[in-house]
Amino acid sequence: MNKKRLAMAFSGPSNSGKTTLIVKVSNILQDRGFSVCIVKHDPKDKALFDKPGKDSYKFSETGADVLVVSSNKTTLFKKRTSSIDEIVNLFGDFDYLLVEGLKTLDLPRISIFRNNLDESYFSVTNAIASDDTINDDDIPTNIYKLDLNNPENIISWIENNAKRV
């Protein structure tokens, strides 16, 4: 079966609602029968995925790239960052790839704002998803406006603007 292979990135300040929106979009898409992959940027390298003392942790501590395979999941501990092409190849076939953060990736991007706009995001933003705490008149006219509380509308925009990878 041919997959859509559509990629969309999401950005925004901490606590703007990025994760909440991605979860809503992912759940709706999966309810419709699509396969969804999600990539999360960890800019401060804070996320922990393994426990000290476990074999996979010991392997990872050697500096080697480690792949842990079980009957229900595959976990990769890679000691360097990945390009969008490497990420796409890792996931194989999918319908939607949703990326949180990673402003350097060449992907169409929805930035999420509540309470105030951060103009530093405008140069990498194709659309802004906001709630009624943001005045639409403050959003530049070249950036599409989306309702943060309407994930169906956001999915329609993604359908029409995502990058095929």
Image (cartoon, helix red, strand yellow):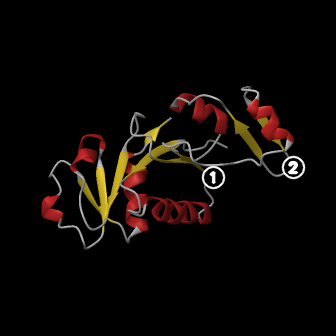
Q: Is residue 8 left or right of residue 38?
A: left
Q: Position of residue 16 (x, y in %)?
A: 38, 62
Q: Secondary structure at mark 1?
A: loop
Q: Nearer the viewer, residue 128 or 119?
A: 119
Question: Does the rendering let one see residue 92?
Answer: no
Residue kind at label 1, given as amino acid type: Ser
Return the mark for residue 35: 1
Q: Nearer the viewer, residue 88 or 162?
A: 88
Query: Can you tell which quarter of the image residue 156 is in?
Result: bottom left
Which residue appears at 14% of the width and 52% of the height? 141
Q: Nearer the viewer, residue 46 or 42?
A: 46
Q: Secondary structure at mark 2?
A: loop
Residue kind at label 2, given as amino acid type: Ser
Q: Is residue 7 left or right of residue 141?
A: right
Q: Nearer the viewer, residue 1 or 20?
A: 20
Report crowding for label 2: few under 14, some 14 to 19, many 20 or more residues within 10 A (C-alpha). Answer: few
Return the mark for residue 71: 2
- Image height check: is 71 above or below 150? above
Of the image marks 1 and 2, the number of the one nearer the N terminus? 1
Report crowding for label 1: few under 14, some 14 to 19, many 20 or more residues within 10 A (C-alpha). Answer: some
Quadrant of the frame with the N terminus: top right
Q: Position of residue 88 (x, y in %)?
A: 58, 35
Q: Position of residue 101 (x, y in %)?
A: 44, 46
Which residue appears at 66% of the width and 49% of the height? 48
Residue, far front = 53
Q: Is residue 140 left or right of residue 96?
A: left
Question: Does the rendering let one see residue 140?
Answer: yes
**Inter-mark Cα distance, 1 to 2:** 19 Å
Query: Mark 1 against mark 2, which lies toward the viewer?
Result: 2
Q: Position of residue 44 (x, y in %)?
A: 50, 43
